Amino acid sequence: MSHDSASYQPGRVRLARGVSPWLLPTVTAAAVTSLLSRRDRRWALAAAPLAALTGGMLWFFRDPERTPGPARILSPADGVVQSIDPWPDGRTRVAIFMSPLDVHVNRAPLAGTVTSVEHVAGGFVPAFNKDSDKNERVVWHLDTVLGDIELVQIAGAVARRIVPYLAAGAKVAKAERIGLIRLGSRVDLYLPEGIAPAVSVGQRTVAGVTALDHG
């Protein structure tokens, strides 16, 4: 068994924080139409798809427990490495694409103190599009043993709501939950100068588990 799969904790899955505005109306509608269908079977035409939608949303908004990986820098997101780009200042950007089927909760890549959490307005083009760098996003800066670490949560065509869980000044542990991007999108992590990525383009990552560096 790989380290990534061994770090899941089966049976300990909860719903992500920040999903109530989306989930509660669907659950309520499914429950009401299900009760009504007991009196009039015609309501079953609405109850069945609503029940299926509720099940899908419960899956989309799952938040499984994770055992943090031993690496120095961990992946902040579940998904696929979309690109690895050298940056002009010497850092390396690792972009991780999150599909609607991935877990949408993001985690701290290493321990530190949140120095800033900035919401930046923008568009909503698909996250795999090169222009998604201008999308709605939340920019994080963490003060860590490696210095300043920048992490960016980017909204996409479907994911139009980013929910940070922490504010500036908060202490954060490695692999701790830091926020949610509803229905997927992209997370970029900037590795400090001199740190080579331990992942490759196309590789799947697990938030809080997969190593992003060789340290």
Image: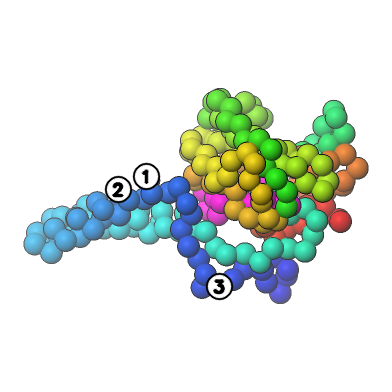
Among numbered discs 1 and 3, the one appearing first in the sequence: 3
Q: Nearer the viewer, residue 142 or 139?
A: 142
Q: Please, is residue 87 above or below residue 15 in the view? A: above
Among numbered discs 3 and 2, the one appearing first in the sequence: 3
Residue marked by disc 3? 10
Mark 3 → mark 2, Cα distance in angstroms: 28 Å
Q: Please, is residue 117 above or below residue 101 in the view? A: above
Q: Which quarter of the rendering shows the N terminus?
A: bottom right
The answer to whether residue 32 is magenta is no
Residue marked by disc 1? 21
Question: Which dot, 1 or 3, sits closer to the camera?
Answer: 1
Tell me residue 77's x, y (percent). Answer: 64, 50
Looking at the rendering, the stretch of residues picked out in magenta corresponds to 95-110
The answer to whether residue 101 is magenta is yes
The residue depicted at 80 percent of the width and 56 percent of the height is 72
Q: Nearer the viewer, residue 19 or 113?
A: 113
* Label 1 neighbour load within 10 Å: few <14, some 14-19, many 20+: few
Q: Please, is residue 112 above or below residue 141 in the view? A: below
Q: Nearer the viewer, residue 143 or 42?
A: 143
Residue marked by disc 2? 25
Tell me residue 55's x, y (percent). Answer: 38, 59
Q: Judging from the image, what secondary structure is the residue with disc 3 in?
A: strand
Give the residue type at disc 3: Pro
> Which residue is at the far right?
194
